[in-house]
């Protein structure tokens, strides 16, 4: 069976393309979704690509991924810096998690330097724009090929 990766995007990422393009680039969320789908296809992965502005919805999707998906790629947006609930939901999923940010959060305001998610993530990619999503998918493909010990 083709391994499925859940790709989650948090608040305001529906505005990509028009929202602070200096920070987040010109690509729309639909462009990002298409780029991820193409990349996943080439890697032999399936993806479910989702975005929400509602924290509880993202938590419900995370719970539902348990046992159904092989990993979670998440750009939690501003919830990165505020949400213990999302961190706990990701931990409860017992799935490998990769945290991705389009911008380099460490070059930005100090409140963006703290992530509640990083401590439960396999790894974190930031500052590489949409390429970061494709790198994360590539890593998942590699991870899922490795024999489980
Ligand atoms: C972001 C960085 C966050 O600090 C910000 O709140 C976002 C987007 C990024 O992709 O660079 O909404 O996660």
Image (tube, grey):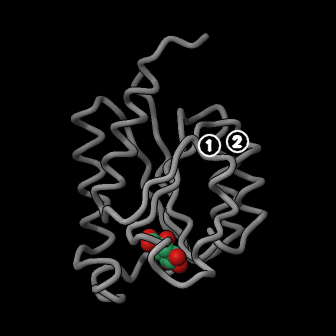
Where's the C terminus, which quadrant? top right
Quarter occupied by residue 43: top left
Q: Residues within 10 Å of mark 2 (few under 14, many from 20)?
A: some
Where's the N terminus, which quadrant? top left
Residue that label 2 marks: 93
Could you say where residue 146 lies in the image, as x and y percent from the top left? 46, 16
Q: Are marks 1 and 2 in contact (CB under 8 Å)?
A: yes
Asked whether, in this view, residue 89 is left or right of residue 104, the answer is right
Task: Depth check: give the residue in front, 112 or 52.
Answer: 112
Q: Secondary structure at mark 1?
A: helix
Q: Earlier in the sequence, mark 1 or mark 2?
A: 1
| Residue at the image point whose x is 48% and y is 81% from the top | 108
Q: Secondary structure at mark 2?
A: helix
| Residue at the image point whose x is 65% and y is 51% from the top | 62
Quarter occupied by residue 140: top left
Q: Residues within 10 Å of mark 1 (few under 14, many from 20)?
A: some
| Residue at the image point whose x is 46% and y is 41% from the top | 5
What numbered label is drawn on residue 136?
A: none
Of circles 1 and 2, which is in front? Answer: 2
Asked whether, in this view, residue 24 is left or right of residue 99, the answer is left
| Residue at the image point whose x is 28% and y is 48% from the top | 37
Asked whether, in this view, residue 94 is left or right of residue 30, the answer is right
Position of residue 77 relative to residue 18, above or below, is above
Q: Is mark 1 within 8 Å of ligand 1?
A: no
Q: CA distance from mark 1 to mark 2?
A: 7 Å
Asked whether, in this view, residue 144 is left or right of residue 62, the answer is left
Could you say where residue 96 lies in the image, as x and y percent from the top left? 59, 37
Task: Depth check: give the residue in front, 13 or 111.
Answer: 111
Residue that label 1 marks: 65
């Amino acid at each position: 069976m083709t391994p499925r990766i859940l790709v989650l995007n948090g608040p305001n990422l529906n505005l990509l393309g028009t929202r602070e393009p200096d920070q987040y680039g010109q690509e729309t969320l639909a462009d990002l979704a298409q780029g991820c789908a193409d990349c996943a296809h080439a890697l032999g992965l399936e993806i479910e690509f989702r975005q929400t502005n509602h924290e509880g919805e993202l938590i419900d999707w995370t719970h539902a991924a348990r046992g159904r998906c092989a990993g979670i790629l998440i750009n939690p947006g501003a919830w990165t810096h505020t949400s213990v609930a999302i961190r706990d939901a990701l931990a409860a999923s017992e799935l490998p998690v990769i945290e991705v940010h389009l911008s380099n959060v460490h070059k930005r305001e100090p409140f963006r330097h703290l992530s509640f998610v990083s401590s439960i993530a396999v790894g974190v990619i930031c500052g590489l724009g949409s390429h970061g999503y494709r790198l994360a998918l590539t890593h998942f493909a590699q991870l899922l090929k490795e024999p489980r010990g």
